[in-house]
Image: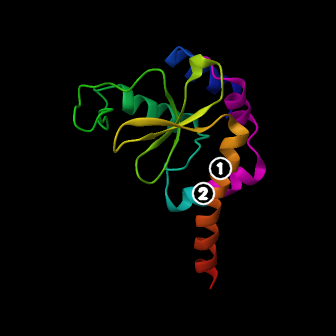
Amino acid sequence: MNETQIKRLEKKYAIAFPSGYRQMLLHPPEYFAALLKYDAKANPGQTPFFWDHRLIDGMNEMMRNPDDPEYFGFDPNDDSKPWPVRYFIIGSDVGGNFYCIAPKSGKSRIYFWYQGDTSFSKFSNDMAGFVKRVFKIYGEVDAMDCKSDTD
């Protein structure tokens, strides 16, 4: 991702990305990127961190725009309840849950949105903590998948 693509997203959503998130988009840690690329092969569009500006935009648009053909309401039981604009989607999991930041806070704290109860829980305080936690969760699963692929 490049600075122009980042600025386009910031302008469209009227936000400024926190520096930790911006740095992660511009300069992803090598091993973290490799882990997520491996994961993305099995689950396209469902990785904890999105680097493609089109995917980032598409996911955020889908959750905010009721006219989007793939829109689903923030509350699965009430389609009229909009996605809280405070949160910006940066990744997802295979269950349709999202990793988010709250850009207007100025911090790179990551939240996890669970669609089962529409709650936002703190996932990590910063991008470094996010990377460590994702490695722990996904690394173990991907290591098991890799092992079974090679046995």
Quadrant containing the C terminus in the rendered view: bottom right
Residue type pointed to by label 2: Ile
- The residue shown at (49%, 26%) is 87
User: Range of the magenta residues?
Assistant: 16-36
C-alpha separation, residue under disc 2 versus residue under disc 1: 6 Å
Q: Looking at the picture, how far across and down is residue 60, in whole percent? A: 45, 30
Q: Is residue 9 left or right of residue 58?
A: right
Q: Is residue 130 left or right of residue 89?
A: right
Quadrant hosting residue 19: top right
The answer to whether mark 2 and mark 1 are in CB contact below 8 A is yes
- The residue shown at (22%, 37%) is 77
Neighbor class of circle 1 (other Cα within 10 Å; few <14, some 14-19, many 20+) is some
Q: Is residue 28 magenta?
A: yes
Residue type pointed to by label 1: Arg
Up/down of 29 relative to 2, above or below? below
> Mark 1 highlights which residue?
133
> Mark 2 highlights which residue?
137
